[in-house]
Amino acid sequence: MTNGRLPETLKSKIQNSLRLRRALGLVWQSAPGWTLASIVLLVVQGLLPLASLYLMKLVLDTTTAGLAAADRGAAFRQVAFYVALLGGATLFERLCSSIAGMVSEVQSQTVTDTVQDVLHSRSVAADLEYYESSQYYDTMHRAQAEAPYRPTHIVNGLVQLAQSCLSLGAIAGLLVAFHWSLAVVLFGAALPGVLVRLRFSQIMYEWQRRRTSTERRAWYYHWLVTNDGSAKEIRLFQLGDLFIGRYRALRRQLRRERLAISARRSATDFGVGVLATLAVYGSYAFVAYRTVQGQITLGDLVMYYQAFQRGQGFLQGVLGGLAGLYEDNLFLSNFYEFMDLQPKVVEPAQPEPVPEPMRQGITFSHVNFQYPNSQRQVLEDINLTIRPGETVALVGENGSGKTTLVKLLCRLYDPDQGTIAIDGVDLRQLATADLRQRIGVIFQDYARYHLSARENIWFGDIHQSPDNGRIEAAARQAGADQVIGDLPHAYDTVLGKWFEDGEELSMGQWQKVALARAFMRDCQIIVLDEPTSALDAKAEYEVFERFRQLAAGRTTVLISHRFSTVRMADRIFVLQDGRIIESGSHDELVRCNGNYAHLFEIQARCYR
C-alpha cells in the first residue's frame, strides 16, 4: 500500500469481485427458483462421471475374470448387471443434461428480459443532459451490446465451473491414487491455454472500448440507408452509394483489426496446443506401460485412460470457466458503467407540493445556462414573470434560447445560475413527475409513435382511461378529428408504415395529432413550441380559434416564428443571443420600432 492507497492490482480485483457479486445478485433476483434448480442439477451432474468410470471398470474387470470362470453363465449375468447399471447411469446423466438445458434456457431468457427492463428503465431515467454527450452514446452502446447476455454467461459459466470442479476433484483423487505425476501433467497441459485466453480477452476488451465510436458511426450509416426519415433525401441527392461506401470502409477497418487479433490468438493457441498434446499422449503411454507390466488390470487401464481424458476436459472447463468469468466481468463493466451514471437533475429529499392553482405565477430570476460540453452561453441573466392565466410568447431567431427556456421550465435541465419558481417555490424543491404532470407541452420536434391514433393522443395523459371521451375531445380541439375519421379504422388505425396495415400521415396531419396529445392533458400550464409550423393558414387559424377557448384561465407559453400566432399573446418576450432584449404586447412592441417591429414588418411584407 502506497500513501494510503490500494495497489492497482488489488483495487482491480476488488472491483471485479464487486461486479461479479452485483451480476449474481441480479441473476438471483431475476430467477431465484430456476437458479436453485441449476445448483441442484450441477451437484448431481458433477458426481455422475465418476460413477460411470467406476462402473466401466467393473464391466471390464468382470468380463476379463469371466473368461477364466467355470460358470460363464453366472459370469455373464454379473457382467450384464454392471452393464445395466452403467446404462442406467448414462440414461440418468442424459436426463439430467436435458433438464439442465431446459432450466438454463428458461433462466437465460428470464435474466435477459430482466436486464433489458433495467436498461430501458435506466435509459428513461437518464437526464436529458447525457444526450448532449458523445461519451454517453458510447457508454449506452456498449451497455446495450453486452448487457443482455453477459449476466446469463456468468450464470452458465458459474454453473459449469462448479460442476467441473466437483467432477475434477473426484477424477483428480482417482489419478493421484494411481500416480501423482498424472495430476501434474493434467494441470500443466491445460494451464497455458487458459493464460492465453485471459491475455487475449483483455486485448479484445481494450480494442472494443477504443473502437466503440467507430462501431457507432458504422451503425449510423446503416441506420441512414435503412430508415424512412432519410429515405427521400438519400434518393433525391443520390447519397446511397456514398453512405454504403462509408459503412463498408468502417466495417472493413473493424474487421481487419479484429481478424488480426484473432490470428494472433489462433497462432498462440496452436503453439500451446502442441505442447499440451505431447504431455497428454506421454501420460497415455505411461498408463499403457504399467498395464503391460501387469501392475494394473485392463479395466484399470480403461478407467485411468478415460479418467485422464475426462479430467482434462473438466480441468479445461474449470480454467476456461474462470477465464470466461474474467472475460464476462470485463465486458459487464460496460453495463455497470451505464447503470452507475449519476443524475444531474436531482429529486428533492422532501418535495414540496406543486402550487395549484397558481396565485403568483412563474418567475425566472437571473437564470444562466449553457449545455454540457459546450462553450456557448445559451441563456444569460434571464428575468421574467408569467402571471397566472396569462399567455406569453417567446420570439427570436433560431438559437436565441426560446426552447431552452421551456426545457428549464419542465426541469429537463437545471439552470447553472439563478432560480425558476412557481409561486415562490423553486422548481428544484418539486418532484419532477408532479411538476411535469401539470405542464402540457408540444415541442417542434414532437414524437411520431407508430401505434394507433388513439394511443398517440392518449399518451398525452396516460392517467386517463384510453376509452373515455377526452381523446375525441382533444382531437376535435386540435383539428385532428377529421383526419382520424378518414382513416380505415378511425382511432384504431395504426399510424406510420413501420407495422402491418399502418397509414402514413402528412407532416401537417402528424402535427395535429401531436397537438391533440398536448390538449389531452388537463393542466394549468400549456407550452406550445412552434405548434403550427406544418399547418396551412386555414388549419392554423382553426387551431388557434379552438386554442383560445382551451387556454382560457390557463397559463400559456407560445414559441412561434409566425406573428399571426404571436399577436394573440398578452405579452411578448424577444430573445437575442440568450438575452431578453424587448418585452410588451404586440402593439407596444410595434410602436417601439425595435427588433420585434423589424421582424414583424419583414413577415407582413410577404402578405401584402
Image: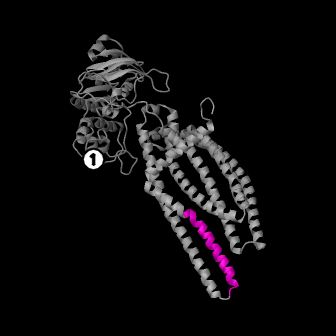
User: Is the stretch drawn in magenta largely helix, strand or loop?
Assistant: helix
**Eyeballing the image, is 606 above or below 457?**
above
- Say which quadrant the C terminus sits in: top left
Does the rendering let one see residue 606? no
Residue range in magenta is 45-69
Outermost residue, top direction? 592
Q: Residue 109 at what x, y percent from top left?
A: 46, 54
Does the rendering let one see residue 355? yes
- Applied colour scheme: one colour
- Count of number-bearing discs: 1
Q: Name the secondary structure under disc 1.
A: helix
Viewer-nearest residue: 538 or 290: 290
| 418 relative to 42 in the view: left or right | left
Q: Residue 572 at what x, y percent from top left?
A: 30, 19
Q: Which residue is drawn at 45% across and 26% down?
A: 371
Viewer-nearest residue: 605 or 577: 577
| 102 relative to 266 in the view: left or right | left
Q: Residue 358 at what x, y percent from top left?
A: 24, 25
Q: Which residue is drawn at 45% across and 23% down?
A: 370
**Quarter of the rendering containing residue 532:** top left
- The amino acid type of the residue labelled 1 equals Ala
| 138 relative to 267 in the view: left or right | left
- Say which quadrant the N terminus sits in: top right
148 part of magenta stretch: no
**Eyeballing the image, is 374 above or below 433?**
above
Q: Residue 514 at what x, y percent from top left?
A: 32, 37
64 part of magenta stretch: yes
Residue named by callout 1: 490
Q: Which residue is drawn at 69% across and 80% down?
A: 64
